[in-house]
Image (spheres, rainbow, N blue to C red):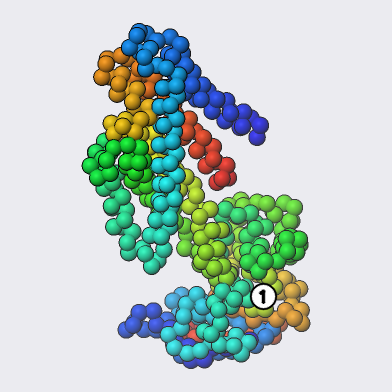
């Protein structure tokens, strides 16, 4: 027990160390004047913060919409809609993330809101699909037993179906989380900031220290957040 | 008391009915056994009694009340139910599984705990040992016992049991059947009458019959002996 938490805390701190330590080192040791102009603490940390906010808002909204929609289309009276909804969500997924951003930029203009909106669309699919899959794969015997013993549909949902589908739903959320951290690096193209700004700027001015900083931060953030979600998953499904 | 009056169930219009014109009565304290080949409507008959299935025609009365006018949730809470496939909740401990109906009825925590231990004892399973285990850690026979314990939990005046020993090998089945006879004889009290419907349990039925408590009903449709 203690051992398990020791490992968890150790790896979390290690990943957080990479996320903080690598840019910290680069801020302290810029390779040249161009790099030094961008590698200011307040600029780098603001990009990191923007990235985290993009991730958090998009994922939270996607979890709410995705699970509710997934539950609804798994109900007998809405099940006819399931193939349609899953296919629409699939299309949202097939369009490249940059394309999704471009489409919504055309409609909603530039900025943070558009980026969040596009990321939400992008993150809903895995959550919705996994929620639906988790709900419909529950053995009908279990539901029948619960019904036969006099549980109301809401109680069955809360006490039987959701807990049983939770591991699959959590897998979908983790999947969405990794995708959103990656896709959020593109938010910079529509002036929504995030760690992508450093990558894009770094590539534009051919300063590898800049884009390495952005890339390492984004990658370690994705792994760190996934690791934390995995700990949550293990704790809630045990 | 359960009584069925001319109950017919047709699943799809045009198909032959699964249950046709069934009229029967199970008195308080009586054990009723439905016997017949698979597909003759035993499970359908049972599920109509707790309204998991609505009859196409006919009326069903529980203690004189027309069940189609009762709230199905209330009705089911009054009827202990063991389904063919047991259907234990794999994410809950044995104690939580058994406590399902008492918790739906909002019993106080202490009373629920007491009842769970009492039932585990009755099933011949040590509460200390089994209380916090998951159904996955049990053998087939133990699972069936938990299924029955769960149905008995809130002391329902009526029990419906759908092949509670269906999935067992003959030796375990024989042992469990004897055990259930013991449980049943222990748990019948004046206020606790037990109309039971059991399926396909010829051996057990013969034993019960020798106690003089069994009524037989032939389902009119496709019945064979």
Total number of numbered labels? 1
Label 1, on which residue?
B156
Q: Where is residue A198 in the image (x, y as percent from the top left)?
A: 34, 22
Label 1: state its secondary structure. Answer: loop
Observer-nearest residue: B198 or A88? A88
How crowded is the residue under tag 1: few (<14 C-alpha within 10 Å), some, or many (20+)?
some
Left or right for B111, reference A148: right
Percent position of residue B80, x then y: 62, 73
Please tell me in which quadrant of the rendered image residue B178 appears. Answer: bottom right
Taking the image as drawn, is residue B205 in sight?
no
**Quadrant containing the N terminus of chain B in the rendered view:** bottom right
Horizontally, residue B19 falls left or right of residue B77, namely left
The residue that appears at 73% across and 71% down in the rendered structure is: B182
Q: Tell which of A137 and B171 is nearer to you.
A: A137
Asked if residue A74 lies left or right of residue A7, the reply is: left
> Which residue appears at 40% of the width and 47% of the height?
A62
Chain under label 1? B
């Amino acid at each position: 027990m203690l051992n398990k938490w020791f490992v968890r805390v150790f790896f979390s701190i290690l990943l957080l160390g990479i996320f903080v330590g690598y840019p910290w080192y680069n801020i302290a040791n810029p390779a040249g004047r161009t790099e030094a102009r961008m590698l200011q603490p307040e600029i780098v940390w603001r990009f990191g913060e923007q990235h985290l906010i993009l991730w958090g808002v998009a994922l939270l909204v996607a979890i709410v919409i995705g699970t509710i929609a997934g539950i609804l289309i798994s109900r007998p009276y809405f099940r006819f809609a399931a193939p349609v909804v899953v296919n629409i969500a699939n299309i949202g997924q097939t369009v490249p993330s940059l394309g999704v951003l471009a489409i919504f930029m055309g409609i909603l203009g530039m900025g943070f809101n558009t980026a969040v909106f596009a990321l939400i669309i992008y993150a809903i699919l895995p959550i919705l699909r996994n929620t639906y899959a988790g709900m419909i794969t529950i053995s009908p015997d279990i539901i029948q037993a619960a019904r036969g013993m006099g549980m109301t549909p809401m109680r069955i949902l809360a006490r039987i179906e959701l807990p049983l589908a939770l591991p699959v739903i959590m897998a979908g959320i983790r999947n969405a989380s990794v995708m959103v951290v990656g896709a959020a690096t593109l938010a910079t193209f529509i002036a929504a900031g995030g760690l992508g700004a450093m990558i894009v700027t770094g590539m534009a001015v051919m300063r590898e220290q800049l884009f390495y900083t952005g890339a390492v931060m984004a990658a370690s953030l994705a792994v760190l957040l996934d690791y934390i979600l995995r700990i949550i998953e293990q704790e809630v499904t045990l | 008391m359960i009584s069925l009056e001319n109950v017919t169930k047709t699943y799809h219009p045009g198909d032959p009915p699964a249950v046709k014109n069934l009229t029967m009565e199970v008195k308080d304290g009586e054990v009723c056994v439905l016997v017949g080949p698979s597909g003759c409507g035993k499970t359908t008959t049972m599920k109509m009694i707790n309204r998991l299935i609505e009859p196409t025609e006919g009326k069903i009365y529980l203690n004189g009340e027309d069940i189609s006018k009762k709230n199905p949730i209330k009705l089911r809470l009054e009827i202990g139910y063991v389904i063919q496939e047991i259907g234990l909740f794999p994410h809950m401990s044995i104690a939580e599984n058994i406590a399902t109906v008492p918790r739906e009825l909002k019993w106080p925590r202490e009373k629920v705990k007491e009842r769970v231990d009492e039932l585990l004892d009755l099933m011949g399973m040590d509460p200390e040992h089994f209380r916090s285990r998951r159904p996955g850690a049990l053998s087939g026979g133990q699972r069936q016992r938990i299924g029955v314990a769960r149905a008995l939990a809130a002391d329902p005046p009526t029990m419906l049991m759908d092949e509670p020993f269906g999935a067992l090998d003959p030796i375990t089945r024989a042992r469990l059947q004897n055990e259930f006879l013991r449980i049943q004889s222990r748990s019948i009290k004046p206020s606790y009458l037990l109309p039971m419907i059991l399926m396909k349990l010829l051996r057990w039925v013969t034993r019960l019959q020798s106690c003089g408590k069994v009524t037989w009903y032939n389902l009119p449709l496709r019945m064979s002996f």
